[in-house]
Amino acid sequence: MPLSNAQTNLPSDTPDLSLIVPMYNEEESCQRFFETVVPVLTSLTEKYEIICINDGSRDDTFAVLQTCRAANDRIKLINLSRNFGKEAALTAGLDMARGKAVIPIDADLQDPPELIVDMHKAWQEGAQVVLARRIDRSSDTIFKRLSARYFYSLFTKLSKPGIPADVGDFRLMDRVVVEAMKKLPERSRFMIGLFAWVGYRQVTIDYVRPERAAGETSFNFTKLWNFALDGIFSFSAIPLKIWSYFGVGVSILSVIYMSYLIMQTIITGVDVPGYASTLSVILFFNGIMMLSLGAIGEYVARIFVEVKQRPLYLINELEGFDQTVASEPQPSPRQSVG
């Protein structure tokens, strides 16, 4: 494939492929993950790295990762100081990855490593982003399937650019795309939206999503709800603007209703309004005001997070990286190494 500008001046020891693997309480999945993914990578190249980010796991995930690294020095470890969330862990991996192509992947093997072969081929043929699209989500619960379908539809209608349906973090990105991602400084990060925002030449590969290989997902209803809110409020101003249009509509209806009351009073005399109808109107508009204040609050909360300029994540330990990287006090505006 033709080299991008981001690849022309890379050092000779630059890996061909970098895998980014965020991990949270994946003690049971680690060994099986490496047993599955390493043969796939070695079939493509000997120059690869697997960057595992331990996102404040409460089990022995990091200890298991250290054992796996002792058997394969291409495994590199980032141990965050606490749980910062998957989006921050992904960002840490992107910041530290050196490969000509970078692939975020989950450790639960629901993103089949075998698909990396097809993704690598599409990349060599000129694609800068290779998306993996789930065409069968029967392994997910009914609630998760329905919520994902409606969320993708709503997000696409509210934001530009939209995000491709049923495409998660699992994708291959050329070095130039990774460098573009590293220029995005926001703290409230919705990675799927950011991946779509940077653009570049894309192709899509379909696959059937299997069951988790081990362990249980850490995503519950609350996390999925907050994930959806982050996506919508980070990429669309419509929830903020819609109340202006609603106010105009209510004003027009109010003028019409006021004209009706005036005409009715002139024709039939003074009319005493009912208690129930008055209370209903008051409660309705109070509810509308609370909704509008809630939407404003969501944006203000994100402004509050951004202006504090805190690091997106803190690194407690690094294993397998160059000493020059590990010793820098603040390698990027989004991170800090302790």
Image (cartoon, helix red, strand yellow):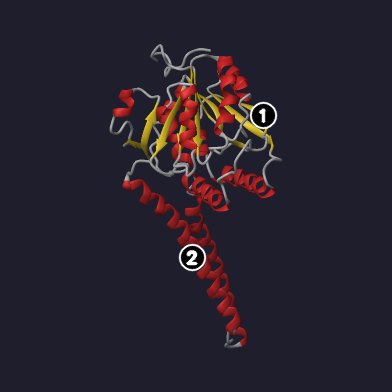
Q: What's under tag 2, amino acid-wise?
A: Met
- The image quadrant of residue 130 is top right
The reply to whether dot 2 and dot 1 touch (C-beta < 8 Å) is no
Q: How many marks?
A: 2
**Of the numbered discs in the image, which one, if any, rests on residue 112?**
none
In this view of the protein, which residue sits in the foreground, 2 or 238? 2
Q: For mark 1, give the secondary structure.
A: strand
In this view of the protein, which residue sits in the foreground, 170 or 336? 336
Which residue in the protein does label 1 denote? Answer: 206
Q: CA distance from mark 2 to mark 1?
A: 43 Å
Give the left or right position of residue 167, taking residue 336 as reference: right
Indicate the quadrant containing the C terminus: top left, top right, bottom left or bottom right. Answer: top left
Which residue in the protein does label 2 denote? Answer: 290
Residue 217: x, y in percent? 58, 44
Residue 46: x, y in percent? 51, 14
Residue drawn 61% across the image and 32% down it: 111
Residue drawn 54% across the image and 32% down it: 30
Decide which of tag 2 and tag 1 comes sooner along the chain.
1
